[in-house]
Image (cartoon, helix red, strand yellow):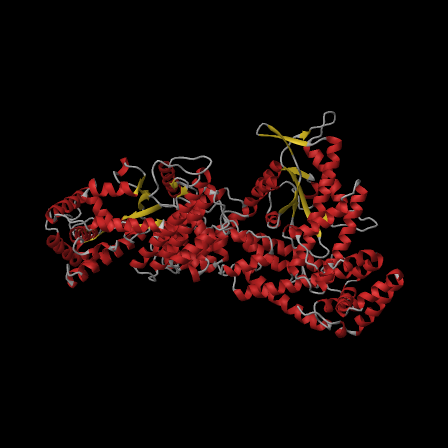
Amino acid sequence: MKVLSPADFPALLSEQINQNRQQFTSTNPDYLAWFEQCVADKKFSEQLDRVWCGSQYAFDLCCRKPLLFRELVDSNNLKTTYTKASIQNNLSHRLVHTSNPKELDSQLRLNRNQEMLRIIWRDINRLADLEETTRDISLLAEASIQQALDFHHNNLVKLYGRPMAIINSISTEQKMMVIGMGKLGARELNLSSDIDLMFCYPRRGETDHKKNPQDNGEFFTRVARKLIQSIDQMTVDGFVFRVDMRLRPYGESGALVLSLGAMEEYYQDQGRDWERYAMIKARVIAGEAKAAGQLMNVLRPFTYRRYVDFSAFESLRSMKKMIQQEVKRRRLDNDVKLGPGGIRDIEFIAQCFQLIRGGRELELQERRVQTVLTVLAEQNTMPVKAVEELQAAYLFLRNTEHGIQAFNDQQTQTLPIDHLPQAALAMVLGFRQWPDFIAALTKHRNNVSKHFQQIIADDKEAVAMDKPSNWDTVWLADSDNDNDQVLAYLAEAGHEDGQAVLTQLQRLQKDRTVQRMQAVSRERLDQFIPLLLQAVANTASPSATLLRIVPLVESVLRRSAYLVLLVENPNALKQLVILCSASPWIAEKLATQPVLLDELLDTRTLYQVPEKDKLRAELQQHLLRVAWDDLEAHMDGLRYFKQAHQLHISAAEVIGKLPLMKVSDYLTMIAEVVLEHVLELAWSNLVAKHGRPQKSKGVACDKDFIIVGYGKLGGIELGHGSDLDLVFIHNAASGLSTDGDRPIDNGMFFTRLGQRMIHIMTAQTPSGMLYEVDMRLRPSGTSGLLVTSLSAFETYQKQDAWTWEHQALVRARVVAGDKQLSQTFEALRVELLCQHRDEDQLKKQVGAMREKMRDHLLPKGLEQADPPIFHLKHGTGAIVDIEFMVQYAVLAWSHQHPALAVYTDNIRILEALQQQGLFSIAEAEALTEAYKAYRAHAHRLSLQQQPSEVPLADFARHRQAVVTLWLQVIGCRR
């Protein structure tokens, strides 16, 4: 921001310069020589003129307290950027000999005066940016509060004893916590802020005074009252900060201090929407750190809902409406905070997204507005240009606010109407003339208003879709008298089963949950259903689509904020209808996990699937702020990550954007990224408890552990409902233990590691299961060890494994874990697959296993039906026949053609068979074409929740090609 030279000041301020200097020297003649020496420095002289012209308060303070002014100048503190420790130490030094409350209050105020003069000087001269200015004022408040708290606590302990509580059968001393709300909590205080506080103490109990014990609540109420008096009361030295306690539970009628339990109970049972808004910036600024963490853990679930909460729009609109009414009533259009396009509008925009998304996107759990806006841009939640305009406006408006307040140290954000303060404000903001300042201010306020209206519109603007009255009639119809009229309208709108729709709507109306809904929730439902009816009328099968979506509606009746999401975002409703019309599987997933509705908001990302590196980075970012020991939060985060990306993939698939092979690729990549994180999480958890396993005495393992994916995971062919076939292998030495305080045997460590990983993936949480896990392909199956050493795995595969286990090894691939061990395993896999085998014996074993699978898994009588039915996976000439032929070829011929053992997916193995001259081009293409066609159709059927059964005639050509090649390669068929 431009700094105006005194040479460019308007005439009104130029006159003020001379008057100010004359008044200071005449009032303080003893300082004349010192002053003349100071102003001989041109740089200092210019800074002085800016400050004294821009802040009448600073000028008056220098005149009244010249020694204070001189100390600041001579110490070079006006040129110094303070640290938090500097601010605390300066105050502590002042108070070192303080012995009574009167001295405390006086020193707190003198310190405040000196610090405010320093802060104003640096702010007006742009020696400090906005962040430093607001931080220093906030740190001054925190230091003052902490010193006052400690002083009065210690004084009252002398009278009443220490407040105590029984914790784990031990009598423990209690300390009060001070919660800074609003700008203090965010360290965004302005030059003349009041401070919003709340007080809390950990546990109920009483003081340990033998003769005069006090209830803890009474003791801390005394502390709180004295603290407020020391900070807020006006004396001959002024005040420290104005204190506002109205944000506490029950407001002015509530207790001044509450226990942690009482505070938790209040916010769980009675907390209101505006209190959620206030809690965004809440921070414990004084008191015991451990108890402060417990308190914030209590407040966080109240502030940030675990689901996407679009109901925040309604409460923010209501608050905004009240403020607008107050603006009109008090004629506050010239208020840069509360007026149109003011600071409050920017705060509303940021906090709106925080309340909606902050429970799930931890990056938004920030207190500072500028930081939140940056996150919104980084996440593409808001356009970068919009965020840049809002941030520029915020800087300009906050600097304007400081310019207004610095003039007379008054708590106001109203633009001045007199010429002198106008000229001073314009100068502070870098403008020579008032009209130039107003033009810049107007531009910023217009930008803010524009973005505010786009995000937090008025109620009438919120619903972008019009609701034809007929759809209201359908939903609110009298079930006894209007059925014929409703059925006629549904038929006219293209419904193929109007009676089923009418029955479902009437059943929903009579649902007990609907009958018991609160008024606001019922209003949301009545607003949403007509919009839904209108939206499904544009699909090919309106009735089927509506009936698929109704379970989703039923699942969110108790969390009607999801209905608000769809009402507020017509495009999200449109995408919901498109996807549910295309796939009942998607409809069921959304009904089970409505939190995924948030993914429908942005079509730029809904149908896009990132590559593996981006997936990995996104998961890392999503869980970046979750502590490694918070297992539940990691499990929830992993489940949402998987479900959200699975939704993106299925959405892209049903609109034809992703072919089958890409779908499987992406589903496999998601599983791999998840498994990497699950391994890191389980490893971190166990190492924290037991230390690291040792490779040799005194040498810790470098995570010598791998996860081997078999089946569809290993073959890069996962489907939407696929489980994970896994084998866990480690390479740590036997006979050694971990190196932690609670050591356990290496083998036990890795067994627990496997158990922990399985628990993380298979535990049923409110977000469902991450993956079903099948460990039966490990050596010796269910009777074998959960985690095996590499040497034991090698021995088993070479000496005891069945042919079908070597078939499974064809599709085995390391999907997570140590790189060196992965390479060792891959070399062993190739060695095992390239062993020489008797082909005749191998054909018999493969053929026998195939027939055994068919007997167990193929529904009886399908192929003998009239007309015959073909099972795409287990039928004769189906997917499994192709897989068995490929596995046979690898086991039979890899000793002569090692290239066959390189890949784990069937398509590339078929390419290798053709390239090695073992299959002709026609044969390889026939199997590849059949395999792709079978899988693609089975995949589509799964999204429609249909079995993998089709008329045999539809795939007769592919089936015949597979059967012919089976007879040529394996040679046996029942």
For the residue pair 34 and 115, the one nearer the viewer reads as 34
| Residue 60 in the image, given as x and y percentages of width and height | 82, 60
Give the left or right position of residue 361, taking residue 155 as reference.
Answer: left
Asked whether residue 947 is in view, the answer is: no
| Residue 606 in the image, given as x and y percentages of width and height | 41, 59
| Residue 407 in the image, given as x and y percentages of width and height | 77, 62
For the residue pair 634 and 71, the one nearer the viewer reads as 71
Residue at 72% from the left image edge and 57% from the top image edge: 191
Question: As drawn, which residue projects farthest toward the top?
Answer: 211
Q: Quadrant of residue 896?
A: bottom left
Give the left or right position of residue 613, taking residue 850 as reference.
Answer: right
Q: Quadrant of residue 605?
A: bottom left
Residue at 52% from the left image edge and 53% from the top image edge: 363
Q: Is residue 91 above or below residue 49?
A: above
Give the left or right position of residue 334, taking residue 637 as reference.
Answer: right
For the residue pair 373 and 134, the one nearer the viewer reads as 134
Q: Is residue 400 above or below residue 506?
A: below
**Rendered-image quadrant of the N terminus:** bottom right
Asked whether residue 280 is in view, the answer is: yes
| Residue 325 in the image, given as x and y percentages of width and height | 67, 57
